[in-house]
Image: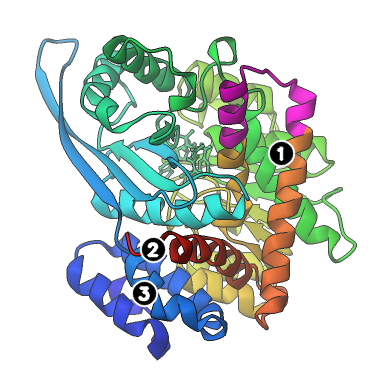
Amino acid sequence: MTDAFAALPSAVRGTFDTVRARDPHEPEFQQAVHEVLSAIVPVLERHPAFVEGGIVERIVEPERQIVFRVPWVDDSGRLRVNRGFRVQFSSVLGPYKGGLRFHPTVNLSIVKFLGFEQIFKNALTGQGIGGAKGGSDFDPHGKSDAEVMRFCQSFMSELYRHLGEHTDVPAGDIGVGAREIGFLFGQYRKITNRHESGMFTGKGVQWGGAEVRTEATGYGAVFFVENMLAVHGESLDGRRVAVSGSGNVATYAIDKVRQLGGIPVTASDSSGYIVDDAGIDVDLLREVKEVQRARISEYVTRRRSARFVEGARPWAVPVDIALPSATQNELDEQDAAALIASGVRAVAEGANMPSTPAAVAAFRDAGVLFGPGKAANAGGVATSALEMSQNASRQRWSFADSEDKLRSIMGDVHDAAFRAAERYGHPGDYVVGANAAGFERVAHAMLAQGVI
Ligand code: NDP
Ligand code: 2IT
C-alpha cells in the first residue's frame, strides 16, 4: 500500500513525509492521513490562518496514545496476554469519543487510522465530541462468555483511569457489541464506585443505553444513500443492494434497505458471502450471527433461495448499490471495476475505509455516487452523542423520536458534505466535501484554543 500513494500538493506534502518517516510501519494510518490531506488542499488555500497556525502538522499527531498489557486466564487455566490500545486523538470539540475494536489484526496503525478518521467524522455530525479509538488484538470468536468477561475486566482495569464522561467515552466497533459493553461498563462501575452512565455509549437500553443506537450506523448509512439519490430525483425503491459483513452495521443496513423498498441480496463474513435473490431475511441472519454466533454459511442451510460462496467477497454480484460494511480495504480496484461494469449507481461506506484508494478513484472517475465512511457511517457516533445527552439530562427518548433525529442528522451530514464540495469547487465529490467540512470545524476550534 505504501508505494501506491499519489503525489500530494506541496501545501501538505511535508506533513505527509513527516508522518511516513515517523511511523513507517503504519500503512493504514498513512492511508487515512493521505486521504484527508489530499482532500483539504482547497480549504488550506482559502484559509491561510490554518497554515500559519500549523493545524495540519498538529492534527496528524495524537494528543495521547495509551498501549497496555491485558493479562487474563482462559477456561483451561492457561494465562494469556493481549495488547490494549486507546489513541486519544483530538479533544478540541469535546471529550474523546470513538469505539473499541477487538480483533486479532488490531495494532497501533489500525487504531490510529480509526482515531484519525473519527476526528473529522465526529466534527461532521455537528455534535460536541472529540476523536479517539481503542481496542485490542483479542479475538472474541470461539471464546466462552466467561473468557470474554475476564478479558473485558482485565482490559478495563487498566483503561478506566483514562476514561470518564467529560474525558473519554468509548463505544463498540468490530468484536465489541452488547455483551462486551456490558462487561466493560460493569468493571468500570466496580472500580470507580460510580454508575457514570455517560462514560460509555451503546449500553443496554435497560441500563442507560439509547434507543436506536444499535441500529444507528446501518440505518444511517442507508439514510445517507437515500439523500445522495434524492439529489438526482432517485430512490432506493426496487434497487438491488450488496452489503458486506454480517455484524452490527451490515445487519441494520440490510434491515433499513428492506424497509425502504430496496432488495438487499448479499451479506458476508470472513469465511465468504451469501447471495439471496429473494432478499436477505434479517431475522434469520440475526439468528445465525447474533444468537448462534455461527458462520454465515449456516444461513443457506435454512433458506432455499440463498447460496454460499466460500472465500470471496460479494462485489461480483450485479447490484445498483453497494454498502461495504465489514472492515478496512475490503473493496479493491478489481472489485470496483466489477461493480462499475455491472452498472452500480451508488456506494456508501458503512465500514471505516473499506475501499482502497484505487477503488475510490475508480468510483469517482466513473461518476458513481460515493459516500465516504466518515460521512456515510456517522449515524452511529451521532446517536452515541444523543445517548450522552439523554444520560446527562436523565431522559429517555422513544425509538420513533430517536430514529427521526438520526434521519435528520444524516440529512444534515449529507448536506454539509454536499455544500462543502460545491464551495470548494468539487461539486458532487463527497470525499472532498466530507473531509473539508469536518476539517474546517476542527481547524477553527484549534485556532481559537491556541497552541496546545
Ligand atoms: P461487527 O463485529 O459487528 O461485524 C463485523 C463484520 O465484518 C463481521 O461480519 C465480520 O466477520 C466481518 N469482518 C471483520 N473483519 C473482517 C475481515 N478482516 N475480513 C472479512 N470480514 C471481516 O462490527 P461492526 O458491524 O460494528 O463494524 C463493521 C465496520 O463498521 C467496521 O469497519 C467498523 O469500524 C465500522 N463502524 C462501526 C460502527 C458501529 O457503530 N458499530 C460505527 C461506524 C463504523 P467475522 O465474524 O467472520 O470476523
Ligand atoms: O467508527 C465509529 O464511528 C464507531 N465505531 C462508533 C463510535 C461511537 O463512539 O459511537
Q: Amino acid at mark 3?
A: Gly
Q: Quadrant of residue 388?
A: top right
Q: Mark 2: which secondary structure?
A: loop
Q: Earlier in the sequence, mark 2 or mark 1?
A: 1
Image quarter where the C terminus lies is: bottom left
Tag shown at residue 450: 2
**Residue located 65% across and 55% down the image:** 322
Q: Amino acid at mark 1?
A: Leu
Tag shown at residue 406: 1
Q: Quadrant of residue 85?
A: top left
Image quarter where the N terminus lies is: bottom left
Task: Specify few, some or many for label 3: CA neighbours under 10 Å numbering under 14, 14-19, or 20 or more.
Answer: some
Relative height, residue 301 to residue 67 (above, below): above
In three-dimensional space, the C-alpha distance between marks 2 and 1, rounded to whole angstroms, equals: 33 Å
Is residue 348 or residue 272 the one in the foreground?
Answer: 348
Task: Specify few, some or many for label 2: CA neighbours under 10 Å numbering under 14, 14-19, or 20 or more.
Answer: few
Q: Earlier in the sequence, mark 3 or mark 1?
A: 3
Is residue 276 or residue 79 the one in the foreground?
Answer: 79
Q: Mark 3: which secondary structure?
A: loop
**Residue located 57% across and 69% down the image:** 436
Q: Position of residue 120 (x, y in %)?
A: 51, 57
**Residue located 70% across and 77% down the image:** 423
State the extent of the magenta-drawn residues as a range: 384-403
Task: Specify few, some or many for label 1: CA neighbours under 10 Å numbering under 14, 14-19, or 20 or more.
Answer: many
Q: Which residue is mark 3?
A: 54
Relative height, residue 336 to residue 414 (above, below): below
Q: Amino acid at mark 2?
A: Gly
Q: Nearer the viewer, mark 2 or mark 1?
A: 2
Q: Position of residue 128 (x, y in %)?
A: 55, 44
